[in-house]
C-alpha cells in the first residue's frame, strides 16, 4: 500500500468522540462525494459515491452514529469505473442530515465563511480538523516522503478549494490553491506543515512515519552537501597544486630553480617534492616553518615569475 493509502487507512478508523466533530467530518465527506436530488414532492435522496470502499464505510459509520441510519453499500459498475455507493432516501432522515451539515447555503454544505469561524459547524478548531480529515479521505492524497513532499485535496470547484485553503490557514497551515486542468487543488508542499496536517487530522502513526523518513532525508541531504563541499574543496586544491607545479616546472626549464632568490627556490623544491601536500603541510616542511599565508604568498610569486617568463619579460624579481 502507498503512503497515502496508509494515511487514509489510519484516518478511516479515527472517529471523533464529540458529536459536533462527527457532523463536521460527515459534512466534508458529503460535500465531496454526495449527490442530493429531490423528487416532485420535494423529498430528497442522498447518494454517496466513492472509488474507495473504506471511505463509504466511514460515511456509513458516521450516519449510523449520528442518525441511526442503516444502509447497505453496493457497487455501481454502469460508468467508466466501478464506484462504491450508499443511498439514503427516507425523507425525514434526509432533512435531518442536511440540516446538520449546514443546509441553507447554495450547496447545502459549509462555505468559506464557515471556515473562518462563526455560529456554524466549523466554529471550533476541533471541528475544522475533523472537516479536513473528511475532505482528505474523500479527495486527498499525500506523496511518499521518501520521494517528495506534497499534500493535496482535489476539488471540482474553485470555491471548494478556496474554502479548504482558508480552513488550513485558520489552523496555521499555509494552504494554497492551483488550477490543474478542469480541477482546483488545495495543496501544501512544505514538509513540516504536511507533518502538522497529519497531526491535525489525527493520524499520529502516519505522522511519526513521515517524520522518521523526513529526518533520514535531511541527514542524507546534509551528508551529501558536506561530501559535495569537501569534494569541491579537494578538486580546487588539486587544480591549484597542478597549476603551481606546472609553473615551477616551466621556471626550471627556462632558467633553473637554483636561480630563484632565497625562500622561493626552497618553496619550489618542496612543492615539487610534495605535490599533494596542503599549504599548512608545505609550511611545516620549510626551514624555518612558515604559516599558510606565507606559503600562499610565495607560491603566488612563483606563478607571477612563470607568467613574466612566458611573456618574455625581464626583471622577474
Image: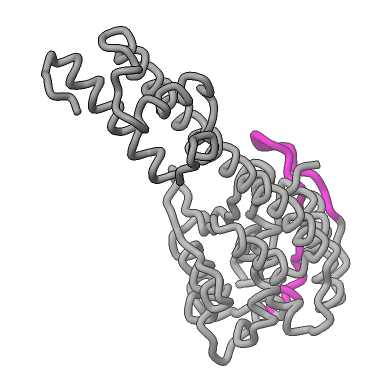
Quarter location, residue 70 = bottom right
Tell me if 38 is positioned left or right of 51 in this view.
Answer: left
Decide whether residue 80 is among the magenta residues.
yes
Percent across and percent down for residue 23 are 72, 78
Provide the residue span drawn in magenta.
73-95
Percent across and percent down for residue 27 are 66, 72
Is residue 311 placed above or below 66 in the rendered structure? above
Is residue 125 placed above or below 184 in the rendered structure? below
Q: Residue furthest bottom?
A: 119
Q: Quadrant of the N terminus?
A: top right
- Asked whether 164 or 93 is in front, the reply is 164
- Asked whether 130 or 27 is in front, the reply is 130
Residue at x 13% of width, y 24% of height: 315
Is residue 262 placed above or below 205 in the rendered structure? above
Residue at x 84% of width, y 81% of height: 17
Q: Quadrant of the C terminus?
A: top left
Is residue 292 placed above or below 238 in the rendered structure? below
Tell me if 313 is positioned left or right of 23 in this view.
Answer: left
Percent across and percent down for residue 121 are 63, 83
Residue 145 visible here: no
- Asked whether 42 or 146 is in front, the reply is 146
Decide whether residue 89 is among the magenta residues.
yes
- Asked whether 117 or 121 is in front, the reply is 117
Tell me if 269 is positioned left or right of 3 in this view.
Answer: left
Q: Residue furthest top?
A: 253
Percent across and percent down for residue 174 are 50, 67
Residue at x 28% of width, y 32% of height: 301
Q: How many marks?
A: 0
Residue 174 visible here: yes
Residue at x 51% of width, y 65% of height: 175
User: Coloring scheme of the render?
Assistant: one colour
Amino acid at each position: 500500500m502507498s503512503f497515502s493509502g496508509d494515511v487514509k487507512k489510519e484516518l478511516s478508523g479515527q472517529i471523533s468522540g464529540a458529536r459536533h466533530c462527527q457532523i463536521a467530518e460527515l459534512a466534508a465527506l458529503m460535500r465531496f462525494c454526495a449527490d442530493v436530488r429531490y423528487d416532485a414532492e420535494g423529498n430528497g435522496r442522498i447518494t454517496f459515491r466513492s472509488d474507495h470502499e473504506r471511505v463509504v464505510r466511514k460515511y456509513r459509520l458516521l450516519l449510523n452514529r449520528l442518525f441511526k441510519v442503516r444502509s447497505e453499500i453496493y457497487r455501481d459498475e454502469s460508468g467508466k469505473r466501478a464506484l462504491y455507493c450508499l443511498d439514503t432516501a427516507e425523507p425525514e432522515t434526509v432533512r435531518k442530515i442536511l440540516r446538520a451539515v449546514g443546509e441553507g447555503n447554495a450547496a447545502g454544505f459549509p462555505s468559506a465563511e464557515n471556515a473562518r469561524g462563526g455560529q456554524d459547524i466549523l466554529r471550533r478548531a476541533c471541528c475544522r480538523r475533523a472537516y479536513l480529515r473528511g475532505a482528505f479521505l474523500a479527495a486527498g492524497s499525500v506523496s511518499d516522503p521518501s520521494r517528495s513532499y506534497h499534500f493535496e485535496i482535489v476539488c471540482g470547484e474553485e470555491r471548494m478549494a478556496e474554502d479548504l485553503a482558508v480552513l488550513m490557514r485558520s489552523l496555521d497551515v499555509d494552504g494554497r490553491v492551483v488550477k490543474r486542468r478542469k480541477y482546483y487543488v488545495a495543496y501544501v508542499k512544505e514538509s513540516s506543515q504536511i507533518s502538522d496536517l497529519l497531526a491535525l487530522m489525527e493520524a499520529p502513526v502516519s505522522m511519526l512515519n513521515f517524520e522518521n523518513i523526513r529526518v533520514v532525508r535531511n541527514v542524507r541531504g546534509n551528508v551529501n552537501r558536506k561530501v559535495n563541499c569537501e569534494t569541491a574543496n579537494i578538486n580546487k586544491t588539486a587544480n591549484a597544486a597542478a597549476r603551481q607545479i606546472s609553473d615551477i616546472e616551466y621556471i626550471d626549464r627556462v632558467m633553473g630553480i637554483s636561480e630563484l632568490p632565497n625562500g622561493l627556490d626552497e618553496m619550489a623544491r618542496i612543492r615539487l617534492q610534495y605535490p599533494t601536500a596542503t599549504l599548512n603541510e608545505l609550511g611545516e616542511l620549510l626551514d624555518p616553518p612558515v604559516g599558510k599565508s606565507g606559503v600562499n604568498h610565495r607560491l603566488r610569486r612563483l606563478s607571477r615569475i612563470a607568467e613574466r617568463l612566458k611573456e618574455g619579460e625581464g626583471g622577474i624579481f
